């Protein structure tokens, strides 16, 4: 894919990107029709790897963290290494969007057969980065430094908290030989209209820790509760009592946080006090200190409330993704590039979001910046659009060209920046 030689480098990037748009949309639709869950992205990874090899990249590694692919392009001119990341996995969601390429796929997840859908837009991310790889390969003769393309599996997590995704890719040397000086990533999002880029220096997305609490009581007849120990009443008090961790014990002027219960299971009949109740939930924070505080206090609060009810609480917490923290200097440096790509009126400072991202693991290793790219149709109120992870999630494919241009310009501009 060539562009006229008598135009500026930035115009050349945009011209090549425009020529690749139809191909990127076709890839995205193919991935959308054939979604694969975490560590099951065999077909997707094979398409990615074949494409990178066909481009003649200097190195293409497969099987990284199960199904991940890492490709390295070395430019003709000296310069730094920059990494670009896309995630490939879909979600256990049954699609309810009327599209000719809608998913009809099913798979086994956690021992259950489930519908599978790209309900978070990772099909877009994969197609975008494939396009960027082709675009930058076309510019190899004038490209400074090297670009590492990281196609990551299992961003949405794995059953039973298995090790995977970005953390496992790092453990398997995805960031080595060469080690990048910076990493960029993006996420398509329904909360912004197509044509809009969202940025935020510092903490952008929350940590994603989960918990499991079992309240042990003593079964008895519902008409004579004093003859047993009611775990339902104890569980109700645990649900309410743990809310004070945020409302009364954390400085929410520093950072927000939330403790949410998602499931409550206990009992078989309306007139029997059961032996036990099981609760599960999540807590989200934007500060590592607050994260550890909630982890410790959640267990102590549940155990002591249960004890006061003459019951016993068994508490387990499961560490999820760290806080997604954009390197402030790198993010602010990127603003002129963002405005060049989208136009000043279409680059917005976004609020923090309670969703999480394992891109955060890469950011713990090297400076990184993560951006949102809008995919809700222009003229549509994003507040009325189905959110990411919804079975009704819909992508305006105009956002794909913007995403491709964004990553390509970031890579080229980063390599050309003053040392």
Image (cartoon, helix red, strand yellow):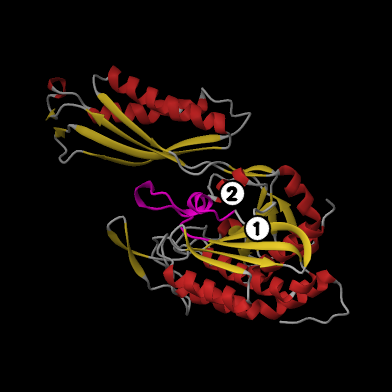
The residue singled out by tag 2 in the image is: 362
The N terminus sits in image quarter: bottom right
**Mark 2 packing: few (<14 Cα in 10 Å), some, or many (20+)?**
many
| Residue at far top of view | 308
Front residue (pair 220, 81):
81
Q: Check the image and report above or below for 246 versus 226.
A: below
* Residue at screen point 85% across, 53% down: 418
* Residue at screen point 58% across, 25% down: 251
Residue bounds of the magenta highlight: 152-175
Q: Are marks 1 and 2 in contact (CB under 8 Å)?
A: yes
Q: Is residue 193 left or right of residue 235?
A: right
Mark 1 → mark 2, Cα distance in angstroms: 10 Å
Would you say residue 305 sits in the magenta stretch?
A: no
* Residue at screen point 16% across, 41% down: 268
Residue 98 position within the rendered picture, expressed as x and y whole percent measured from the top left: 46, 74
Q: Is residue 171 left or right of residue 232?
A: right
Residue 283 position within the rendered picture, expressed as x and y whole percent measured from the top left: 46, 37
Which of the labelled discs sits on residue 83, or is there none?
Answer: 1
């Amino acid at each position: 894919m060539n562009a006229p030689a008598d135009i500026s480098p930035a115009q050349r990037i945009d011209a090549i990107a425009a020529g690749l748009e139809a191909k990127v949309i076709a890839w995205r639709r193919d991935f959308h029709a054939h979604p694969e869950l975490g560590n099951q992205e065999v077909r997707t990874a094979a398409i990615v790897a074949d494409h990178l090899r066909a481009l003649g990249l200097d190195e293409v590694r497969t099987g990284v963290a199960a199904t991940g692919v890492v490709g390295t392009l070395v430019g003709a001119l000296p310069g730094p290494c920059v990494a670009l990341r896309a995630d490939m996995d879909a979600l256990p969601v049954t699609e309810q969007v009327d599209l000719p390429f809608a998913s009809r796929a099913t798979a086994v997840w956690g021992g259950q057969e489930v519908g599978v859908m790209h309900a978070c837009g990772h099909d877009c991310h994969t197609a975008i980065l494939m396009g960027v790889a082709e675009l930058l390969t076309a510019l190899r003769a004038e490209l400074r430094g090297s670009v590492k393309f990281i196609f990551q599996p299992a961003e949405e997590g794995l059953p039973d908290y298995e090790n995977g995704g970005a953390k496992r890719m790092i453990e398997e040397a995805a960031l080595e030989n060469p080690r990048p000086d910076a990493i960029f990533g993006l996420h398509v999002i329904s909360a912004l209209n197509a044509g809009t880029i969202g940025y935020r220096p510092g903490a952008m997305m929350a940590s994603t820790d989960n918990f499991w609490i079992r309240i042990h009581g003593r079964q008895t007849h519902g008409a004579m509760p004093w003859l047993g120990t009611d775990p339902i009443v104890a569980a109700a008090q645990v649900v309410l009592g743990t809310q004070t961790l945020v409302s009364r014990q954390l400085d929410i002027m520093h950072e927000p946080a939330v403790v949410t219960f998602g499931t409550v299971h206990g009992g078989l009949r309306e007139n029997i006090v059961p032996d036990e109740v099981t609760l599960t939930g999540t807590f989200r924070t934007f500060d590592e200190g607050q994260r550890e505080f909630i982890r410790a206090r959640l267990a102590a609060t549940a155990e002591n409330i249960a004890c006061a009810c003459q019951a016993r609480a068994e508490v387990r917490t499961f560490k999820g993704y760290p806080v997604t923290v954009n390197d402030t200097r790198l993010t602010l440096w990127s603003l002129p590039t963002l405005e060049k790509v989208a136009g000043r009126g279409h680059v917005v400072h976004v609020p923090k979001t309670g969703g999480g991202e394992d891109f955060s693991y890469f950011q713990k290793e090297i400076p990184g910046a993560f951006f949102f790219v809008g995919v809700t149709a222009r003229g549509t109120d994003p507040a009325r659009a189905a959110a990411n992870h919804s079975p009704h999630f819909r992508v305006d494919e105009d956002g794909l060209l913007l995403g491709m241009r964004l990553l390509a310009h970031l890579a080229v501009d980063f390599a050309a920046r003053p040392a």
